[in-house]
Structure formats: structure tokens, C-alpha cells
Image (cartoon, rainbow, N blue to C red):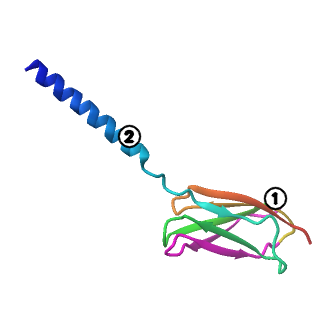
């Protein structure tokens, strides 16, 4: 009986190791990709883009300027998990952009400057 228990224990150990290796081989979920251009386009607008996000979810894009209160804009992602948000900066200078998911967790960030 002791031999049978050792054999069972060895089999379970082998199975556990195989399952652990299989779990490690699973591909990771894609990371959210947030794109913030460094300068506005010719019309003075900046377009913030996001990809690899939860489909049909709301994200908040925060624009922070040292001389003004932060501006939060909420946008819904597409069925493919992407968004594009155009923003007309009200003041010249440097802006920090942070994108948050619906739970308030940061997804990405960037900076841009507007010179007038």
C-alpha cells in the first residue's frame, strides 16, 4: 500500500507541475495602449487615442495644466476597445494627460505642449 501511495503522490506532483507550466504558457492580456501626441495638429487640437481597452466601457481622460483646474472628459470605447478624443487646449503651455478606466485606475499617460 505504501508503494501505491508514493506512486499516486508522484503522479499528482507530475500533474501539478504540468498544469503550472501550462498556466505560465498562456499569453498575457494585451496592455492598454494610450497615445498622446507631443504637439497639437494644425488646427490647434490634440487627439488622444486608446487601444486594447475593455469594449464599450467608459474611460476618463484628464488634462492637467499648472495654471488651471484639471479638465476631465469621459468617452466610451468602441466594440473593438478603442477610442479617439479630440481636445482643444484652452491655454498655452504644458499639459499632462492621464487616462483612467471606469474604476479610476490609471491606464496610461502622456504630455503635450501648446505654443501660441
Of residues 73 and 31, which is closer to you in this image?
Answer: 31
Q: Nearer the viewer, residue 107 or 73?
A: 107
Residue placed under numbered mark 1 in the picture: 66
Where is 56 relative to 64, above or below?
below
Using the image, determine if residue 79 lies above or below residue 62: below
Tell me the crowding category of disc 1: few under 14, some 14 to 19, or many 20 or more residues within 10 angstroms, Cα based.
few
- Please identify the quarter of the rendering in which residue 72 is found: bottom right
- The nearer-to-camera label among 2 and 1 is 2
Which residues, given as a range, are shown in magenta?
66-90
Task: Identify residue for label 2.
Answer: 21
Residue sticking out furthest to the left: 1
Q: Nearer the viewer, residue 66 or 56?
A: 56
Judged from this view, the residue extending furthest toward the bottom is 43
Tags 2 and 1 touching, CB below 8 Å: no
The quadrant of the rendering that contains the C terminus is bottom right
Mark number displayed over residue 58: none
**Marked residue nearer the N-terminal end (2 or 1):** 2
On screen, residue 65 versus residue 58, left or right, reads right
Whether residue 96 is in magenta: the answer is no
CA distance separating discs 2 and 1: 49 Å
Is residue 58 found left or right of 62 in the rendered image? left
At horizontal 23% and vertical 27% (from top left) the residue drawn is: 10
Q: Quadrant of residue 109?
A: bottom right
Relative image position of residue 9 (x, y in whole percent) = 20, 27
Name the spot of residue 7 as percent of width and height, x first.
17, 26
> What percent of the width, then of the height, locates residue 25?
42, 46
Asked whether 72 falls inside the magenta stretch, the response is yes
Amino acid at each position: 500500500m505504501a508503494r501505491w501511495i508514493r506512486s499516486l503522490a508522484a503522479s499528482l506532483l507530475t500533474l501539478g507541475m504540468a498544469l503550472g507550466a501550462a498556466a505560465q504558457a498562456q499569453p498575457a492580456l494585451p496592455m492598454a495602449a494610450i497615445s498622446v501626441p507631443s504637439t497639437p495638429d494644425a488646427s490647434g487640437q490634440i487627439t488622444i487615442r486608446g487601444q486594447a481597452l475593455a469594449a464599450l466601457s467608459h474611460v476618463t481622460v484628464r488634462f492637467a495644466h499648472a495654471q488651471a483646474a484639471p479638465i476631465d472628459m469621459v468617452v466610451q470605447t468602441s466594440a473593438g476597445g478603442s477610442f479617439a478624443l479630440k481636445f482643444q487646449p484652452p491655454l498655452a503651455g504644458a499639459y499632462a494627460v492621464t487616462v483612467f478606466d471606469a474604476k479610476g485606475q490609471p491606464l496610461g499617460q502622456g504630455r503635450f505642449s501648446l505654443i501660441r
